[in-house]
Amino acid sequence: MTVDAPKAGRREWIGLTVLALPTLLMALDLSVLYLALPSLSADLGASGVQQLWITDVYGFMVAGFLVTMGTLGDRIGRRRLLMIGAAVFGAASVLAALSTSPQMLIAARTLMGIAGATLAPSTLALISTMFQDPRQRATAMAAWMSCFVGGNAVGPVVGGVLLENFWWGSVFLLGVPIMLLLLVAGPMLLPEFRAPQAGRLDLTSVALSLVAILATIYGLKEIARYGWQPIYITALVAGLLVGVVFVIRQRGLADPLLDLRLFGNRSFSSVLAMMLFGGIFLGGTTLLVTQFLQLVLGLSPLQAGLWLVPSIIVMTTCAMLAPGVARQVRPAYVMAAGMAIAALGYLVLTQVDGVGGLAILVTGWAIALGGNGLPAGLGIGLVIGSVPPEKAGSASAIQQTSTEFGLALGIATVGSIGTAVYRDQMSDAIPADVPAQIAEAARDSVNGAVTAAERFPDVVAAAREAYTTGLNVVSGISVVVFLVLAVLIAVMVRHVPPFGRMQPAQGDGDPAAPHRAGHDSEEVRPVPAAD
């Protein structure tokens, strides 16, 4: 006989608010720095290389430590790890705001990234503990995803407002009151949970995972920025090879850092693949769209951020509506419909031109993000709900790591496609009387062309047209990819029933697989909070 899962009450919903705030902050911190970079670089005297480390080291550390922190939370307690991470993040934010040298700021950003890696897996795993009813859990996951997406989008807007009224350090101080609230309210509202028979943490696996993830992400990002240089190809290949060694080691450990048996669950692996490949093209097109607003249409970062707000509102709304629809319709069909709607949005983007493209761009992007919003919250819920409770931290870390890889791959691959189209279009578009140095800079990027605006307006016009063509081509490819993803997700996850008819298994959102390979069905309960 199946016993209904307990319903979440007011305490859990208030606790969700406490968990959503650091999630919003973590995402916001990934994008808010770009506007502050010119002023802080001038103030601190940061070199070009130091500026790159200031912007990139946070994301590198988050990506590199996600798997470790997700597993560590399952072992020592998710709430405990969240509290530790919040305290370190708050302190590091103050250090960043008060930095007196580039080296001090880079060190502070490094600490912020390591602490930030505790937030996503801990918050998602705690949500899975607090919301055991599938319908409530889907709504809670959608709210979490909306905060994550919204934080990335409003970062430039928030940064612009702060920098117009305060000094550059104010963008870092955003985190202090939020982390203080989490430290005060967390112990009162959030349950503690850890796996009762968790083994020791394998430090060799930790080192291998860090090297594999950091080298791979670094290689991808630098290839996207500077092209296929030998040093970056070497970093990418080395990261992949170390990743293979990491996987081999996990197969032989009794208590692996990453339990590879999780991938044997069809819901887990299928939804994870959908989110990875969807993220690749979402991340790549996001870069192209934001640069189009600024470099082709000539908007300021703040203006560009404001024009992106409608699409974020649509995405957030769709993410919040999806769980309600999934109560009556199978989640696979809701997610597939979202992928098809996203494809329609990308189809609209293929019609953008460089002269009157703002209205078409904003409309197409809103449709595309709205389509992405439908599977966003449902996908996270299915990934985490399809594993045993004691593995929820690991599952959420895997999901977040795949997101980081998706974004990096998107910038490297999809961004490279747009760049290749741009350079091909520009090869014959530059007049012969343009000096060789300016011509080369214009062929390399639209940024280089814009610097020639006053002396060579024809070059700028050609560059904007070429960049628009690149956006159109990438959008066309995205149409095909998202239609394929729609079909695959509809087929691979169709066995999951609507949430309204789902019988909640013990930590398993996949009712077709109550006994996963390598896992027993013993219920694991939260440990008392007093420890």
Image: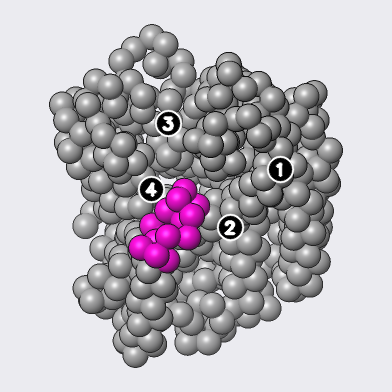
Q: Which residue is label 4 attached to?
A: 59
In this view, the mark in front (4 or 1): 1
Main SS of the magenta part reads helix
Mark 4 touching mark 3, by CB under 8 A? no
* Mark 4 burial class by Cα count in 10 Å: few <14, some 14-19, many 20+: many
- Element under disc 3: helix
In this view, the mark in front (2 or 3): 2
Outermost residue toward the front?
A: 433
Inspect this view and state whether residue 270 appears. Answer: yes
Which label is found at residue 323? none
Magenta segment range? 217-233
Q: Is residue 157 left or right of residue 230?
A: right
**Residue 358 on image: x %, y %:** 75, 25
Give the amino acid type for the residue marked by disc 3 in the picture: Tyr
Between the residue at mark 4 and the residue at mark 2, the CA separation in whole angstroms equals 18 Å
In this view, the mark in front (3 or 1): 1
First of labels 3, 1 by sequence position: 3
What residue appears at the point 53 percent right and 87 percent down from the top-left corner?
517
First of labels 4, 2 by sequence position: 4
Q: Is residue 197 left or right of residue 302?
A: left
306 vs 13: above or below: above
* Mark 1 burial class by Cα count in 10 Å: few <14, some 14-19, many 20+: few
- Element under disc 2: helix
Figure quadrant of the C terminus: bottom left
